[in-house]
Amino acid sequence: MANISLSNLSSEILKGFQTYTDGVTEAVNDEVEQRSKELIKAIKAIKARSPVRDKDGGYYKKGWTRKIERIGGTITITAYNKNRGSLVHLLEHGHVIKGGTGRTKAIKHVGPPTEIETALLEQNIKSIIKRGG
């Protein structure tokens, strides 16, 4: 153990906290990026999750991507469909058929994998904080 004078104690404690904070921040950012990659894979993976119509050759399914924004110490990742973004809500929740003759069946292809990845992210962040990065 190093000998630290009383006058340097506060600066050494602050350095320790800064090291811990930097390590946790980096590990959390890495985990957020990993979970977002897994979310995109999960949405695309199963035909029942991200619908494919024969006539468009999977244009909707292939359009899933993510946008990463880093502002200060905050990371925001948005998963979205670049090809047919307007269809996401209609497919996920169903919609009225043209002419008002009924409703389409909802195809839950975004919600379930999002819930799974969010739960994993929360669990992994708790683990990262406990081990210090």
Image (cartoon, rainbow, N blue to C red):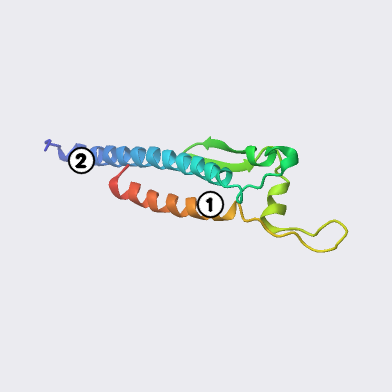
- On the image, the x and y values in percent for residue 71 come to 53, 36
Query: How many numbered tags mark residues here?
Result: 2
Disc on the earlier residue, 1 or 2: 2
Q: Residue at x 26, y 37 (%)?
A: 11
Secondary structure under tag 1 reads: helix
Secondary structure under tag 2 reads: helix
Report which residue position mark 2 lands on.
9
Q: Residue at x 34, y 38 (%)?
A: 23
Q: Residue at x 33, y 50 (%)?
A: 127
Amino acid carrying mark 1 in the image: Pro
- On the image, the x and y values in percent for residue 15 come to 28, 37
Q: Nearer the viewer, residue 104 or 12?
A: 104
Q: Nearer the viewer, residue 3 or 109?
A: 109
Position of residue 12 in the picture relative to residue 84 (left or right)? left
- For the view shown, which residue lies furthest in the bottom direction? 102
Q: Is residue 125 above or below residue 18?
A: below
- For the view shown, which residue lies furthest in the front direction? 54
Q: Locate the N terminus and report the quarter of the image it occupies.
A: top left
Near mark 2 (Cα within 10 A), the count class, few <14, some 14-19 or many ≥20, is few
Position of residue 74 in the picture relative to residue 131 (left or right)? right
Report which residue position mark 1 lands on.
113
* Location of residue 101 by image quarter: bottom right
Near mark 1 (Cα within 10 A), the count class, few <14, some 14-19 or many ≥20, is some
Tell me the CA gap for discs 1 and 2. 47 Å
- On the image, the x and y values in percent for residue 20 come to 31, 41
Position of residue 27 in the picture relative to residue 61 (left or right)? left
- Which numbered mark, 1 or 2, is in the foreground of this view? 1
- On the image, the x and y values in percent for residue 67 come to 58, 37
Q: Nearer the viewer, residue 46 or 77?
A: 46
Q: Residue at x 42, y 42 (%)?
A: 31
Q: Locate the C terminus and report the quarter of the image it occupies.
A: top left
